[in-house]
Structure formats: structure tokens, C-alpha cells
Image (cartoon, helix red, strand yellow):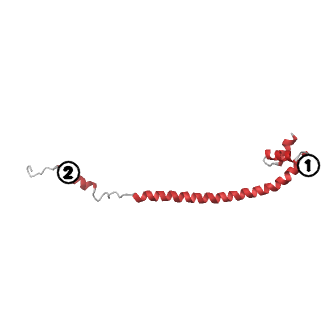
Amino acid sequence: IRGGIRMATKGDVELELEAETSGPERPPEKPRKHDSGTADLEQVTDYVEEKEIQSSNLETAMSVIGDRRSHEQKAKQEDPELIMTEMEISLAAAERSLREHMGNVVEALIALTN
């Protein structure tokens, strides 16, 4: 101590630094181990929800396609006969022309006349 003033030692400085970093201004960091599990659970939940939505959309789409196909089957039974009688060609040629034009009778007839 010189002239009533005490000099700070290395230990005093370290104590002051510790007091500043762990003071009431900043709460200590808590480990967040449980947060990573929550994020994983949310990803799994989102995946399952998407899968459920996709399966219901798939069922709807399949029923629409099934309805269209049943309607097309009825039309397809009459279409080759129409082409056969109008163009005087065989059943195989009429069916092939329909397949080439994706079941469109008008396009098949136009292609056969050209």
C-alpha cells in the first residue's frame, strides 16, 4: 500500500471479471438438449401429415381416373365399330387408329381419310 492506495493484484482483477460476466444482467445459458428432440419430432409429425394428405389425394385422383376410364370403355366399344362401318376397315385397323389418336374418334377418322 502506497500513500493509502492499495494496488490491485492479479486475483482482484479476476474476481471483478467473474462478477461482471455472471451478474444479474445476463442469465446463465441453459443447456438446450431437449430442443433438438422437439425439432426432430416436428419433422416426423410434418412428414406423417404430408403422407396422410398425399394418400387422400391419391385416392381421390384414382377414383377420378377410374370414372374416366369406365366412361372411356363405354365409348371405346362403340368407336371402333363406328370407324369400321364408316371407313370400311378391319377392327384391328380401327382400334390401332384410335390408340394412335388417344381415343379421339374425330382425329382417327380424319387421319384415315388423309
Instruction: Tell which circle, 1 or 2, labels the residue nearer the N-terminal end.
Output: 2
- Can you name the residue that lies furthest to the top here? 114
The answer to whether the residue labelled 1 contacts the one labelled 2, judged by CB atoms less than 8 Å apart, is no
Badge 2 local density, few (<14 within 10 Å), some, or many (20+)? few
Give the quarter of the image for residue 57: bottom right
Residue depicted at 76% across the width and 55% down the height:
69
Residue depicted at 88% across the width and 41% down the height: 113
**Does 109 appear above or below 31?**
above
Callout 2 amino acid: Val
What residue is drawn where x is 44% and y is 58%? 37
Indicate the secondary structure of the residue bearing disc 1: helix
Residue 85: assigned label: 1
Q: Which of marks 1 and 2 is in front?
A: 1
Disc 2 element: helix
* Residue 82 pos. (x, y %): 88, 50
Q: In this view, does 7 lie to the left or right of 50?
A: left
Mark 1 nearby-residue class (10 Å; few <14, some 14–19, many ≥20)? few
Q: In this view, does 52 lie to the left or right of 92?
A: left
